[in-house]
Image (cartoon, rainbow, N blue to C red):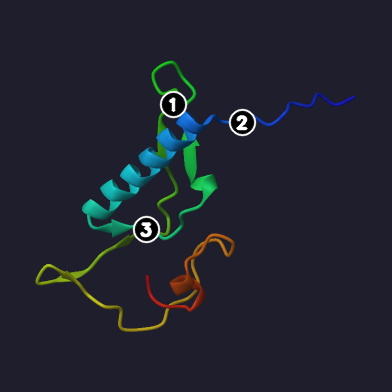
Amino acid sequence: MVNYKRPFKFNLHSILKFGIQAIEALRVVHSNGFIHRDIKPGNFLIGNTKNTSGIFYLTDFRLCKKIHKVNGIIAKPTHKANFRGALLYASLNAHHLDEL
């Protein structure tokens, strides 16, 4: 018989803590002038060492894009784009092929 482990379930406190950390990670990315463009559960990791336990990490910046600003205002995209990201988690703009 194959060893079977029941899926680990997080309690409400942990879910809220990770949600706040995920939002904070995105805030840091945006405040540094970038958009991630591939937000999905698989791109978040949870630390598993003594020093990183309980810390949520945002990963996979391959589709990351620098935000262009004109006079401090985010410039509007000028063209349609190819689809990027994961179909299941992509924004409506990505599905409409709008530049992100």
Q: Tell me if mark 1 has few (under 14), some (14-19) or many (20+) residues whose alpha carbon lies within 10 angstroms of its own.
A: some
Position in image of residue 84 (x %, y %): 49, 67
- Real-space Cα distance between discs 1 and 2? 14 Å
Amino acid type, residue under disc 3 in the picture: Cys
SS at badge 3: loop
Which residue is at 36% across, 84% downward?
A: 79
Sequence-wise, which precedes: disc 2 or disc 3?
Answer: 2
Position in image of residue 88 (x %, y %): 59, 61
Instruction: Verify CB contact (< 8 Å) between mark 1 and mark 2.
Output: no
State which mark lies toward you, 1 or 2: 2
Instruction: Verify CB contact (< 8 Å) between mark 2 and mark 3.
Output: no
Q: Tell me if mark 3 has few (under 14), some (14-19) or many (20+) residues whose alpha carbon lies within 10 angstroms of its own.
A: some
SS at badge 1: loop
Please, is residue 39 above or below residue 84 in the view?
Answer: above
Position in image of residue 92 (x %, y %): 48, 71
Residue highlighted by disc 2: 9
Q: Residue furthest top?
A: 50
Residue highlighted by disc 1: 54
Position in image of residue 99 (x %, y %): 38, 75
Which residue is at 46% across, 19% downward?
A: 49
Amino acid type, residue under disc 1 in the picture: Gly
Please, is residue 53 above or below residue 21 in the view?
Answer: above
